[in-house]
Amino acid sequence: MTGSLVIAGLGPGNDALVTPEVTVALARATDIVGYIPYVARIPARPGLTLHPTDNRVELDRSRHALEMASTGRHVVVVSSGDPGVFAMAAAVFEAVEAGPNEWRALDIRVLPGITAMLAAAARAGAPLGHDFCTINLSDNLKPWAVIENRLRLAVQADFAMAFYNPRSKSRPEGFVRTLEVLKEACADNRPVIFARNVSRPDETINVVPLQDTQADMADMRTVVILGSSQTRIIETGAAPIVYTPRFSS
Ligand SMILES: C[S@@+](CC[C@H](N)C(=O)[O-])C[C@H]1O[C@@H](n2cnc3c(N)ncnc32)[C@H](O)[C@@H]1O
């Protein structure tokens, strides 16, 4: 029996943002594997087994999914947003690389999803309209010195930036330091977008000048976007529109 493994992105939260391709893969699955809140988004049905697991067990979860696919099951590993952005796709391939040869012959596909940064940018306008970069602010998998160096170089290159995993209870200091570095390195008072729970019922989008930002404006449900030196704000009667022109001087 030939099994398969699909690594799928569920988008930022709203079911309307799940792609049709992912919906088809979920309907064909025999097994769903993933972090508890993401698996909770998949309705139970006969013939489908849900395998929710805690965070931080990505490699174990990947091996489990690969083992099931190699016995003929149709397994979907779910991530929020896009599975290739700080998520399960890389973890699965890390397991494939280190695992038995037969895993390399498996039918493995990655199905993209709408990543939090793009959903947030669309809500605010077009802050990523010119060159940008993305930094994961968690120092669980890399030293803090690497993050700080990348921040400084990204400011020097005048990228707009999107920050994932900005602040958690176990890492309260990193985002404090991030804001210190940015306030020092950016000569101007560029806009910062705090987008929390994007596309969910309790979504909030706040646009704050860099100098007025505070670390407690972000948590683990927030993606933060910093404009480049070219980013502009159009004031409207309602929420401001933030955009970065496509040209650069
Ligand atoms: C481990 S990363 C996973 C990213 C995910 N794979 C993606 O493409 O969006 C988790 C981080 O994504 C961001 N995030 C995910 N969903 C979000 C949402 N609906 N609203 C705001 N930020 C979100 C937050 O920064 C959160 O700490």
Image (cartoon, rainbow, N blue to C red):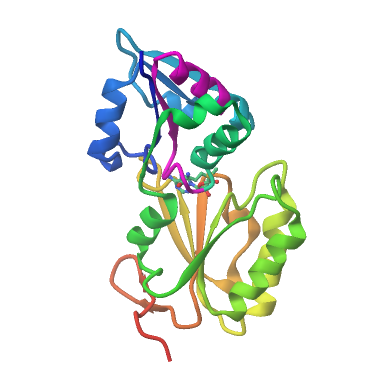
Instruction: Provide the residue span drawn in magenta.
Output: 62-85
Q: Which quarter of the figure has residue 124?
A: bottom left
> Eyeballing the image, is 185 above or below 76?
below
105 or 168: nearer the viewer: 105
Does the magenta run of residues contain 72? yes
Q: Is residue 74 above or below residue 91?
A: above
Residue in front for this viewpoint, 188 or 235: 188
Residue at x 65% of width, y 67% of height:
150
Above or below: residue 194 compared with residue 128 = above
- Residue 207 is a magenta residue: no
- 64 left or right, relative to 172: left
**Residue 138 at x, y percent in the picture:** 66, 50
Residue drawn 72% across and 41% down? 170
> Residue 137: image x %, image y %?
63, 55
Asked whether residue 211 appears in the rendered view, the answer is no
Residue at the bottom extreme, as displayed: 249
Q: Is 182 left or right of 52, judged from the image as shown?
A: right
Q: Quadrant of the C terminus?
A: bottom left
Q: Please determine whether, in this image, residue 203 is positioned above or below residue 66.
A: below
Please provide percent x and percent y for residue 159.
51, 74
Asked if one can make out residue 223 in the rendered structure from this viewpoint, the answer is: yes
From the top left corner, tell me how far across and down residue 7 is, in percent. Answer: 42, 34
The residue depicted at 45 percent of the width and 29 percent of the height is: 105
